[in-house]
Image (cartoon, coloured by chain):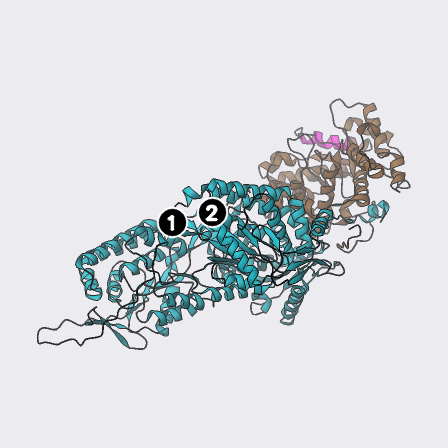
Chain colours: A brown, B cyan
Amino acid sequence: MEELAVRGAAAAPPVGAGHNWPRNDGVDLDLGWVLDQRVNLSAAERRVATLPGRRTVKKDAQAAWLLKAVTCIDLTTLNGDDTTERVKRLCAKARHPIRPDLLDALGMGDRDITTGAVCVYHRFVSTAVEALEGSGIPVAAVSTGFPAGLVPHDIKLREIEASVADGAREIDIVITREHVLTGNWQALYDEMRDFRAACGDAHVKAILATGDLKTLRNVARASLVSMMAGADFIKTSTGKEGVNATLLVTLVMLRMIRAYQERTGIKVGYKPAGGISAAKDVLNYQFLMKEELGREWLEPDLFRIGASSLLADIERQLEHHVSGAYSALNRHPIG
Amino acid sequence: MSVARFFDEMSYGPAPEADTEARQWLARHDGEFGHFINGAFVAAASGKTFDSFEPATGALIARVALGGSEDVNAAVLAARKAQAPWAKLPGHARARHLYALARMIQRHARLIAVVEALDNGKPIRETRDIDIPLAARHFYHHAGWAQLQETEFADHVPVGVVGQVIPWNFPFLMLAWKVAPALALGNTVILKPAEFTPLTALLFAELASAAGLSPGVLNVVTGEGETGALIVEHEDIDKIAFTGSTEVGRLIREKTAGSGKSLTLELGGKSPFIVFDDADIDAAVEGVVDAIWFNQGQVCCAGSRLLVQEGVAPLFHERLKRRMATLRVGHPLDKAIDMAAIVAPVQLQRIETLVAKGVSEGASMHQPRIELPKGGSFYPPTLLTDVQPTSVVATEEIFGPVAVSMTFRTPEEAIQLANHSRYGLAASVWSETIGLALHVAAKLAAGVVWVNATNLFDASSGFGGKRESGFGREGGKEGCYEYLKPKAWLGRKLRPEPVRAAPRPAAGDFGLPALDRTAKLFIGGKQARPDGNYSRPILSPKGKPIGDVGEGNRKDIRNAVVAARAASAWGSATAHNRAQILYYIAENLSARAAEFADRIVAMTGASAAGAKAEIEASIARLFSYGAWADKYEGTVHQPPLRGVALAMPEPQGVVGVICPPEAPLLGFISLVAPLIAVGNRVIAVPSEPHPLAATDFYSVLETSDVPAGVVNIVTGSAMELARTLAAHNDVDALWAFGSSELSTLVERLSTGNLKRTFVDYGKATDWMDRSAAEGPAFLRRAVDVKNIWIPYGE
């Protein structure tokens, strides 16, 4: 039974991180397209529910997929009690997320495995930039009155500019949920356009706060408007809503990314955030990315995972893969 | 492959489900299985066996007993012996047995799932996540019906000994669908699994025995088609339940004709999958995966005929092709695949041949560039576009992973294309507009309709087809009746031979002659001369001529069917409207009660009191069906999903009725009234010896606002007219009451379009007895239940 004749889609050519996909400059707001979006909840649930039965990875493949997930993590701390030392500790973990002996055992000792980014509030951007210097790891700043996004618009723009000035290469903005809930797509588009412009060369991730939007139709429409207005990534949540990332909203957002690419040729990235804390969960997100969007979306330039405790579980799983014995949290450096 | 290579490629590695326990089970039996009869495995009396192979590798998996007549006899004997004590158990005791079987399935779920995947070649995901859990659910659900039988089915008794012949595409699930209701309701079973996939039935029998099921209650006889034929033709079997091809279903109908065996047939399909331009297109694309690439498309209700609204067809096909490229085909025990093996090389060849034919007829074929495992029977997911309705792939069931796609312009055209098929099993409708989706669902000729979903099954909701997809339902309360018969019919006796008086010439005298009344036929709301323009004399019991009626022939039946078909609005009239008309018929009959009573006395020699009683009973019966018309309702099933399944009784359509010779008015009304109450249109052949009550009835119909074509009356020879009606492919059902020869003829000739038949095998019904001659037992046969699944949510 070891060597099953398993065949799937003809293997895509190896794709590494760091391509230069053209940036999404956005398109004019197309209200007809926005309002055309329909999402059938039961059908979406069925797709998500059956996926884990259709795709799985075991042994070496699983270890590889988990390592890949590590490279996509936006290692995050977004707490009221954050301090510079706390942020520095996190940055150190971002540089060395996996114990070197484990990487060696996996035959991956020669690879530069780091997380995808470190994600902090504006106050700690400069600390993180300094701590990560030379690593190539970008710093992402949550912005625009995160998490509720209800500060004045001009202050939001100034917050973005300040973070960019401090060295943030990625800005995670929050949209004004009211615009979605009241169907004010023009306002959402205009707001997002301004955010994008304020970011300059920094990439912008649009946080939709899907837990606040409630319906999948809202999620689909907000995704599309954000992309039309130039979002480089669309992101589920702040981590502070009642419900954060789920496979269900992921499915809807990925399909919107695909529809946007169908029409514009532009690849937009995706970032689920909040609630992904187990290795087996992140695999399902990866399967969904690969199945719905394709191989390219498994790399950090198109896929990020906003998480704080996920890494620790992946470390344990990898040690288990290497040693055959179940691991414990305290065997891996804290982040 | 190394971690590094997986890291670069991000491909899925092998993810095999272990087969250790399954192999151990096979080894414990030395790879050889006998029949399971009377609680034990026994070798075939002939000593013959046949080989069963693993579709994925072609390797021999087991040798299995080849059932011959001695084996079938032994199984029937065991089942017969067990039936009375099994039926006599309190419902609660049988409920405990079924509950134990459900628990047993759950305890051994993985073993069953793995054996099933090996034997059938389908993915372990499907056996593990769908087939086996649904089977367990079926036993739980029917444990409940056993528990409730005494109260819910108090006026019914079990059918008796049941022969069940099941297919290879869902070996274990079909076992559950057949065995659970049969046993729950007090029947005993001889089950024949398909020759390609006998193993899980044997495993089930073994485990069931260990779980305490009494010997003889469930018997498994393995074998090929011949074995199935032995079961079908066995004299001591009371019912046959068959799932399989329409071709074999026809043969079974023919072989059992006149035997008195009750029959359910769940046959083929070419089910439409309709995508409107306001659908969630991605959901619909994923729906296709579940429709036609589920179980390699070897699904009787597979959504194999895609009908896509023209405006969205390019986008839909583009996304579907993209999705096809991500499908993975692999070994059944691989946990990271979408499709596995076709059940046998012969089926693979059939698929290849049909697809080649479709391409030669102009279809464009798309197959994704994915690799298939070497060895074994594998076929890639396939989409045929540019398919015209004239192509063989548009009409024939391919029974493989092949979807054919056509476009439509309007909802009406979608319905027309969808219904333009000899089949009528299932359908799937994709639209986010509730009004549109439900409108179309209601109009589709199918036993099951899924709205924005496909291939959903549950024990609570009946499954089964219309037209050549067979008859009978499995699951739900509607399915229970297939394993029961009315108590009120138990005492029926064979009808005595009719006594025909020798004709005596009418003696003329010189008084004022009676005014001649020539009874014509009644077709399309008009009195019509018979096509042949011959008449037949109607005699009193003493041989005195009392009138002539038209000698209806084939062409009169043809004309009547055309008229009935044209009166389809009756089926969609409101139930209140139909009720009003039935009451009105009763009112108008009542006004002429004395005249009708005299006629009955003259025709039958009944006493005046007897004739009056028949008229009063007729009026009451019309009232009963007027009452039922807006009360014979469907139910809302509660399958485990956020949504509902509406079980809607629908008229069967155009129904022929051969009225019994006795009770010339009451017999006619007892059969015609339930049919029209629920929306059918009828071609009635009145009592052959005493037709004048029915011909007198024309004017009652005419004065009662019955729309033209709803009731058509053709007088003449019951056998001859039944012959034409039974063979008529635009007649949906035929009810025939009369001689046993009539019953045999009707059942035997009904196979052309597999019309539903309701016959009495020559046994007389006491039409005055309401419990035997009126009510739901008749209404159930006047409708097909359509289950419309409506998941909801936003």
| Horizontal and vertical percent position of residue A288 | 71, 45
Quarter the C terminus of chain A occupies: top right
Q: Amino acid at mark 1?
A: Tyr
Residue B355 in the image: above or below residue B239 = below
* Residue farthest toward the right in the current orientation of the protein: A110
Locate residue A171: give its quadrant. Answer: top right
Q: Amino acid at mark 2?
A: Pro
| Horizontal and vertical percent position of residue B13 | 78, 49
Horizontal relation, residue A105 to residue A259: left or right = right
Residue B501 in the image: above or below residue B486 = below
Viewer-proximal residue among B14 and B114: B114
- Pointer 2 local density, CA inside 10 Å: few below 14, some 14–19, many at least 20: few
Horizontal relation, residue B395 to residue A134: left or right = left
- Mark toward the viewer: 2 or 1: 2
**Callout 1: chain:** B
Q: Which residue is mark 1?
A: B632
Q: Which residue is mark 2?
A: B85
Locate residue A285: give its quadrant. Answer: top right
- Asked whether the residues under marks 2 and 1 belong to the same chain, the reply is yes
Horizontal relation, residue B661 to residue B70: left or right = left
Q: Distance between the Cα atoms at labels 2 and 1?
A: 35 Å
Viewer-proximal residue among B345 and A183: B345
Viewer-proximal residue among B118 and A250: B118
Magenta part of the protein: which range?
A136-162
N-term-proximal mark, 2 vs 1: 2
Label drawn at residue B370:
none
